[in-house]
C-alpha cells in the first residue's frame, strides 16, 4: 500500500488529484484540509473511507502535521493547500502569507524531520505551484520555461513565489527530496465558483451579468484539471528531486474568448431568454492584472512523457456538462449550505 499525505484535498485541484490517486487500489490518502471557504467536504464525501482519511486541520499546525506523519507514515506529501484567489489576495493578503508562506514552511520542516527519521524509504514531496510566479509576458515573448526569472505581481503570486523559494531551499540546504511544479490556469469539475470559468458558467446559466475585467484581452494558458493531476502523478512517480517542472495545456486564449465560448456552449445546451453573450459587462480591471501567461512544458514532456490529453474545446464542453449535471454541488455553495458540513467541528472555526 502506498500512502499519500495530500494537503488541500477538499479544494478544486486537490480533490481531483485525490480521486485520481484512489483509482489505484493500492493507494491510501490522508487528506489534510482546513475547510476554508474554498474547501468543500462534499467534493470528497463519496470516497471509500477505508482508503481516504479526511482530517480537518491547518498545514500551519506543526503538532498536527507531525502527528499525522508519525501515525500514517506516508510515502509522499503532495502539497496543494493554499489561499488561491488573486482578488482576495488584493483585498487582504494576510491569510495568503499565513498559509502559503508560513504554512508551507511548517510542512517542509515537519517533512524534513520525518524524512530524516528514515521512517519512509524513498520519501518525496511535491510542491504544487503556479505560473503566476513568473509575472506577465509581452505579446511576442517566449512562453515561461523553468529558467524564467521570478517576477510575481499580485500578493497571491508573491506568496506562492516565496513558498517555491522555501521548497527549493529545503532541497538545496537540507537535501529534502522536493519537486516543484508550476502550472497554468486549470478548469474542470469541482472548481469553486469565484474563478473565471465556473463563475461565468453559473452566472450565464442563471441569466446573471457576466463581469469581464478591463478589455477581456488578458491571455492565459488553460489546462483541464485531470491533465494537471496526471502531470503531478508523473512528477511524484518519476520526477527528479530538486527539479522544477512547468505544466501547461498549449491552449492560450484571452478571457473574452473563453467567455464567448462558454456562452455559445450553454446556448446550444439550455435555452435562455436571449443569447448569453448579451449578458457580458466590462468592469474596471483588476489592479496589477497580468496581461499574458504562457507555458513551455517541453521539460515534463521530454523527461517524463507527459502531455495534455484533452484539448480546450473538449475540456470546456465536459466542464459545462459537469456543472449542468451537478447543480446541487454548486447551488449548495451559492446558498452557503456546503458550510453546514463543518459546523460540527467548532474548534477549527
Ligand atoms: P482551492 O482554493 O480550490 O483549494 C485550496 C484548498 O486548500 C481548500 O480546500 C482549502 O480549504 C485548503 N486550505 C487553505 N488553507 C489551508 C490551510 N492553512 N491548511 C490546510 N488546508 C488549507 O485551490 P486550487 O485551485 O485547487 O489550487 C490548489 C493548488 O494549486 C494551490 O497551491 C494553487 O496555488 C495551485 N495552482 C492552482 C491553479 C489553478 O488554476 N487553480 C493553477 C496552478 C497552480
Image (spheres, rainbow, N blue to C red):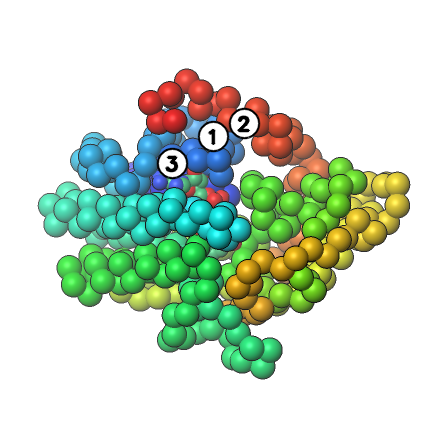
Any atom of ligand 1 within 8 Å of the CB at mark 3? yes
Q: Quadrant of the C terminus?
A: top left
Q: Which residue is mark 1?
A: 41
Q: State which mark lies toward you, 2 or 1.
A: 2
Q: Which residue is mark 2?
A: 338
Check whether the beta carbons of the residues at disc 2 and disc 1 lie within 8 A of each other.
Answer: yes
Left or right placement of residue 253 versus residue 25 in this view: right
Q: Residue drawn 19% across and 48% down?
A: 109
Q: Is residue 106 above or below residue 248?
A: above
Left or right placement of residue 297 versus residue 219 in this view: left
Q: Residue drawn 58% across and 51% down?
A: 187
Q: Which residue is mark 3?
A: 33
Instruction: Compute the Cα span from label 2 to label 3.
Output: 15 Å
Question: Is residue 97 something that shows in the picture?
Answer: yes
Crowd rating for badge 3 (residues with CA inside 10 Å; few <14, some 14–19, many 20+): many
Instruction: Compute the Cα span from label 3 to label 1.
Output: 9 Å
Amino acid at each position: 500500500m502506498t500512502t499519500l499525505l495530500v494537503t488541500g484535498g477538499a479544494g478544486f485541484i486537490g480533490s481531483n488529484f485525490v480521486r485520481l490517486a484512489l483509482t489505484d487500489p493500492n493507494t491510501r490518502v490522508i487528506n489534510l484540509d482546513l475547510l476554508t471557504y474554498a474547501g468543500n467536504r462534499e467534493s470528497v464525501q463519496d470516497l471509500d473511507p477505508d482508503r481516504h482519511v479526511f482530517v480537518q486541520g491547518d498545514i500551519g499546525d506543526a503538532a498536527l502535521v507531525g502527528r499525522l506523519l508519525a501515525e500514517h507514515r506516508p510515502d509522499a506529501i503532495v502539497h496543494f493547500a493554499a489561499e488561491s484567489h488573486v482578488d482576495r489576495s488584493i483585498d487582504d493578503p494576510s491569510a495568503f502569507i499565513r498559509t502559503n508562506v508560513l504554512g508551507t514552511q511548517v510542512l517542509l520542516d515537519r517533512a524534513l524531520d520525518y524524512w530524516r527519521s528514515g521512517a519512509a524509504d524513498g520519501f518525496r514531496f511535491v510542491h504544487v505551484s503556479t505560473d503566476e510566479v513568473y509575472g506577465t509576458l509581452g505579446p511576442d515573448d517566449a512562453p515561461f520555461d523553468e529558467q524564467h526569472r521570478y517576477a510575481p505581481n499580485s500578493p497571491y503570486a508573491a506568496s506562492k513565489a516565496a513558498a517555491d523559494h522555501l521548497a527549493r531551499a529545503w532541497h538545496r540546504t537540507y537535501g529534502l527530496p522536493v519537486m516543484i511544479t508550476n502550472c497554468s490556469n486549470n478548469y474542470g469539475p469541482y472548481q469553486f465558483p469565484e474563478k473565471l470559468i465556473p463563475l461565468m458558467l453559473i452566472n450565464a446559466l442563471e441569466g446573471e451579468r457576466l463581469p469581464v475585467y478591463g478589455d477581456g484581452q488578458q491571455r492565459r494558458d488553460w489546462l483541464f484539471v485531470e491533465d494537471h493531476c496526471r502531470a503531478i502523478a508523473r512528477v511524484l512517480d518519476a520526477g527528479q528531486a530538486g527539479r522544477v517542472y512547468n505544466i501547461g495545456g498549449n491552449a492560450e486564449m484571452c478571457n473574452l474568448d473563453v467567455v464567448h465560448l462558454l456562452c455559445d456552449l450553454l446556448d446550444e445546451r439550455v435555452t435562455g431568454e436571449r443569447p448569453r453573450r448579451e449578458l457580458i459587462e466590462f468592469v474596471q480591471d483588476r489592479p496589477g492584472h497580468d496581461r499574458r501567461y504562457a507555458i513551455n512544458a517541453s521539460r515534463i514532456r521530454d523527461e517524463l512523457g507527459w502531455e495534455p490529453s484533452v484539448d480546450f474545446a473538449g475540456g470546456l464542453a465536459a466542464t459545462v456538462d459537469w456543472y449542468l449535471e451537478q447543480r446541487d454541488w454548486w447551488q449548495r455553495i451559492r446558498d452557503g449550505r456546503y458550510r453546514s458540513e463543518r459546523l460540527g467541528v467548532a474548534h477549527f472555526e
